[in-house]
Structure formats: C-alpha cells, structure tokens
C-alpha cells in the first residue's frame, strides 16, 4: 500500500449526500477481485450518459477537477452495501482523500485499509471547502496526516481527528497483509516450535 503522509492537490466538490456504494461502483462491475481497472467505472451511472459519453454536469468530468485527488462531499458517504470495490474504484481513479461530515462505517474502515484517508469535518468547514473549490477550482488543498490538518494557503487551516493506529498504518503504507508480515519472525518461530512438538500435523 502506498504510504500517505502529505498530499497537496486539487479538490473536487461533489454536492451530494448519501452517496452509496452502488453509486460509487455499480454492481455490474463487481466481478473482478483485482484492485486495479475499476477507476474507469467509478460513479458510472452519474459520470456517463446512456450512450457512454461523459456527462458534462458531473464534477469529475470537468477540468481541472478531472485531476483531483481530494473529494469533498456530503454526509453519509459510502452508505449501502459493504463492497470493498468502492474504495478500490475511488483510489484507482486517483482519489487519495475524501472529506465529508460523516461516512458509513464499513466504507470508512475499508478506506483506511486501502490507502485512502477519510476525513470527518463539521458541516460549516465542509461548506467553506466546497465554496473554495467551486470559486477557485485550481486552488490546491494540503492534507497533512502527520499534523492532522487540512490547509488552503493562508485562507484557512482545519484540524481533524484520526485513530492513532490507522494513522500509523497510513503513514507507513501498512495494509492487513503488511501488518501480518511485520510479525514474520514470531510466526516462523511459532511454526518451528509446533513442528517440533507436534510433527504429525
């Protein structure tokens, strides 16, 4: 997993609430177990017209938001079914951070495990970020995980909370497999001990 320390990028304002996982990645694209290749289908039903052309009204189809790595959106983001494909799709399209007033629990947890930083901020701060992103589309927002701040130049700086263990994992690029591998020496020692004590296993 790619470590997340500091991100300075364009932020896209998605003025929607209750964006569920079927909006993020529709069910017909869940046949793969690969984490790559889903980005082109992210937000498929609102991103594309019925004939497959891009919907010009969808924010991530417009420059400069097309290159956004930060998504600012409404409450209850990631609700619906518990598909891990949702953070896979968002990450594959280039989004590393989602900022919202609230998230669905499973999506929130899956985001951390896949290298996405979900940030919860009060609605008034979300509104300020939205307005800034709309009025100054090319303005860069800085996300500093170490300091736990969201900053826009000299205009504003907001602090956010993050669980210490999840922060450690993101800063060091540790997913569940990498965390297990950190215990490799102890696992090998245990396996050798078991082989000696119970060779019939």
Image (tube, helix red, strand yellow):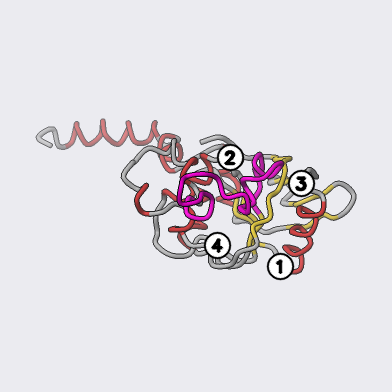
Q: Earlier in the sequence, mark 4 or mark 2?
A: 4
- Residue to which mark 2 is pinned: 94
Q: Earlier in the sequence, mark 1 or mark 2?
A: 2
Magenta segment: 44-71
Q: Earlier in the sequence, mark 3 or mark 2?
A: 2
- Residue to which mark 3 is pinned: 141
Eyeballing the image, is 86 above or below 200?
below
SS for dot 1: loop
SS for dot 3: strand
Q: CA distance from mark 3 to mark 2?
A: 15 Å
Q: Position of residue 113 (x, y in %)?
A: 48, 47
Quick check: is 128 in the magenta stretch? Answer: no
- Residue to which mark 1 is pinned: 122
- Residue to which mark 4 is pinned: 77
Q: Quadrant of the C terminus?
A: top left
Discs 3, 4 touching: Cβ within 8 Å: no
Q: CA distance from mark 1 to mark 2?
A: 25 Å
Q: CA distance from mark 4 to mark 1?
A: 14 Å
């Amino acid at each position: 997993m790619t470590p997340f320390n500091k991100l300075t990028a364009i932020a896209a304002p998605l003025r929607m609430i209750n964006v569920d996982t079927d909006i993020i990645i529709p069910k017909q694209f869940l046949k793969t177990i690969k984490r790559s290749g889903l980005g082109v289908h992210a937000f498929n039903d609102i991103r594309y017209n019925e004939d497959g052309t891009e919907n010009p009204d969808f924010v991530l189809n417009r420059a400069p938001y097309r290159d956004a790595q930060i998504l600012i959106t409404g409450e209850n983001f990631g609700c619906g079914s518990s598909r891990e494909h949702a953070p896979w799709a968002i990450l594959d399209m280039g989004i590393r951070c989602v900022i919202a007033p609230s998230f669905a629990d499973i999506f929130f947890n899956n985001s951390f495990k896949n290298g996405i930083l979900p940030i919860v901020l009060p609605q008034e701060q979300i509104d300020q970020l939205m307005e800034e992103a709309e009025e100054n589309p090319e303005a860069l927002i800085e996300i500093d995980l170490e300091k736990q701040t969201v900053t826009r130049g000299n205009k504003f700086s907001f602090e956010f909370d993050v669980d210490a263990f999840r922060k450690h994992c993101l800063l060091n690029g540790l997913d569940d497999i990498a965390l297990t591998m950190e215990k490799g020496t102890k696992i090998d020692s245990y396996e050798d001990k078991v082989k000696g004590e119970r060779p019939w296993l």
